[in-house]
């Protein structure tokens, strides 16, 4: 009887232990007729803290509000919410999810003409969501909003900056494409670009062209960083970016 009681108490105790997702909250944001699933990480620290938005790649698209989390890895949202980085700088993390047929920016991973390409429902909803969260959550520092993403999410990062260049304090587009002719719009935003020179999904020249165009448009080499992984494929770009805390430290030091 004693053993049974102890077992019951043990199981009850285990049930109260927070899981790895204890600080993540699942939500659906309704923007007109479009639903944007997202998860939101709330740090334990108090005070004015940064907000980091992470945009997933094609393989994580859907509506399950889970695939975009890269569970079991140190990629994406997990990288920004891990204990080591949160100790450096506690931050809120927003991880939205776009449906499989839809992209964050264009209809393919190739560069596109920004002015003639309508904002996707996912991106429009995301920007509305960010505005709502920042207004509602007084613990978010509006001068320290960062955006990052990989593959189709990297393309989304470029697109979000072009749509709202005054919103972001810094950006980290990984293996993404954009419209080089619009480089002047984002020339003053601190940006760190990652790409693999043997990327078989998003051609490395897309990242090179954006960085070159930003510099030619007046961007400072002190503001724009470019890391090209020699012999790196598509995945090598984000595996390199999320390999240690260097990217996190660089991102959170910026403020508008």
Image (tube, rainbow, N blue to C red):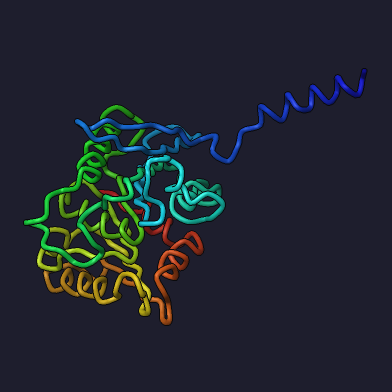
Q: Nearer the viewer, residue 237 or 169?
A: 237
Question: Is 99 above or below relative to 11?
Answer: below
Judged from this view, the residue extending furthest toward the front is: 101
Front residue of 5/229: it is 5
Where the N terminus falls, by quadrant?
top right
Q: Position of residue 118 (x, y in %)?
A: 12, 50
Q: Residue at x 29, y 64 (%)?
A: 176
Residue 43 lies, with reference to residue 144, above or below; the image says above
- Residue that appears at 42% across and 40% down: 64
Between residues 128 and 186, which one lies in front from this camera angle?
Answer: 128
Which residue is drawn at the image coordinates 43% and 56% (left, top)? 248
Residue 67 visible, this orientation: yes
Left of 55 or right of it: where is 241?
Answer: right
* Residue 44: percent from left, percent from top: 50, 34
Residue 191, x across and y down, in percent: 28, 62
Residue 227 visible in rendering:
no
Vertical side of 177 occupied by 204: above or below: below
Left or right of residue 117, residue 89 in this image: right
Identify the residue at the far bottom of this view: 231
Horizontal placement of 247 versus 256: left or right? right
Q: x%, y% of residue 18?
A: 61, 33
């Amino acid at each position: 009887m004693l053993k049974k009681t102890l077992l019951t108490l043990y199981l009850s105790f285990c049930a109260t232990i927070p899981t790895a997702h204890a600080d993540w909250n699942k939500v659906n944001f309704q923007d007109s007729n479009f639903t944007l699933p997202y998860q939101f990480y709330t740090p334990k620290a108090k005070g004015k803290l940064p907000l980091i938005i992470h945009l997933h790649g094609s393989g994580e698209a859907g509506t399950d509000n889970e695939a975009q989390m890269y569970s079991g890895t140190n990629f994406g949202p997990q990288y920004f919410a891990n204990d080591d980085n949160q100790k450096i700088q506690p931050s809120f993390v927003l991880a939205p999810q776009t449906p499989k047929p839809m992209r964050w920016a264009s209809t393919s991973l190739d560069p596109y003409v920004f002015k003639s390409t309508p904002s996707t429902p996912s991106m429009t909803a995301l920007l509305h969501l960010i505005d709502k969260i920042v207004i509602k959550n007084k613990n978010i520092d509006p001068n320290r909003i960062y955006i990052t993403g990989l593959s189709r999410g990297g393309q989304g990062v470029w697109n979000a900056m072009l749509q709202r260049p005054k919103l972001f304090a810094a950006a980290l587009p990984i293996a993404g494409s954009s419209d080089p002719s619009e480089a002047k719009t984002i020339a003053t935003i601190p940006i760190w670009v990652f790409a693999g020179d043997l990327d078989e999904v998003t051609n490395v020249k897309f990242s090179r062209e954006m960085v070159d165009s930003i510099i030619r448009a007046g961007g400072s080499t002190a503001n724009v960083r470019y890391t090209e992984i020699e012999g790196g494929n598509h995945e090598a770009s984000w595996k390199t970016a999320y390999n240690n805390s260097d990217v996190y430290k660089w991102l959170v030091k910026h403020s508008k």
